[in-house]
Amino acid sequence: MPITTKTDLDDIAIDRIIEMAWEDRTPFDAIKFQFGLNEADVKVLMKRELKFSSYKLWRKRVESCKTKHVAKRVEGIERFKCSLQRAITNNKISKR
């Protein structure tokens, strides 16, 4: 589902995607599972929604973060959400 305009997602969903993208422990697979956006779509959204300097900081952080990509994760990390996430956010995954 490529995102082309801001109207494809509401403001709450965009805020949650940005929050998840900034979290070190949340892989892109979790964003894809919940919102249907792959890594490239998240990059486009982040570039569109953030200031350019913030986007550059985020990209640098993501490139060096081993937990953002499931293939790079250390064995033993089998979940993509914090155990406290159910109480913290209105994440659809935590309500199942």
Image (cartoon, helix red, strand yellow):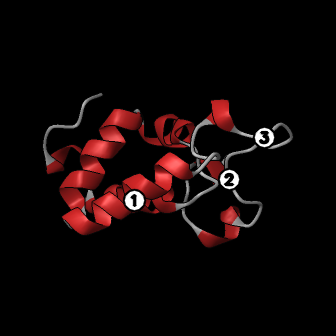
Mark 3 — residue?
A: 74
Frontmost residue, 80 versus 24 = 24
Amino acid at the residue labelled 2: Lys
Is residue 30 shown left or right of residue 7?
right
Q: Residue at x 22, y 37 (%)?
A: 3
Mark 2 — residue?
A: 81
Is residue 43 shown left or right of residue 87?
left
Outermost residue, bottom direction?
88
Mark 1 or mark 2, earlier in chain: 1
Q: Residues within 10 Å of mark 3 (few under 14, many from 20)?
A: few
Q: CA distance from mark 1 to mark 2?
A: 19 Å
Which of the two discs, 1 and 2, sits closer to the camera? 1
Amino acid at the residue labelled 1: Trp
Amino acid at the residue labelled 3: Val
Q: Quadrant of the N terminus?
A: top left
Label count reads: 3
Frontmost residue, 25 versus 54 = 54
Image position of 15 with respect to 21: above or below: below
Mark 1 — residue?
A: 58
Residue 67 in view, yes or no = yes
Is residue 6 shown left or right of residue 23?
left
Q: Residue at x 67, y 63 (%)?
A: 85
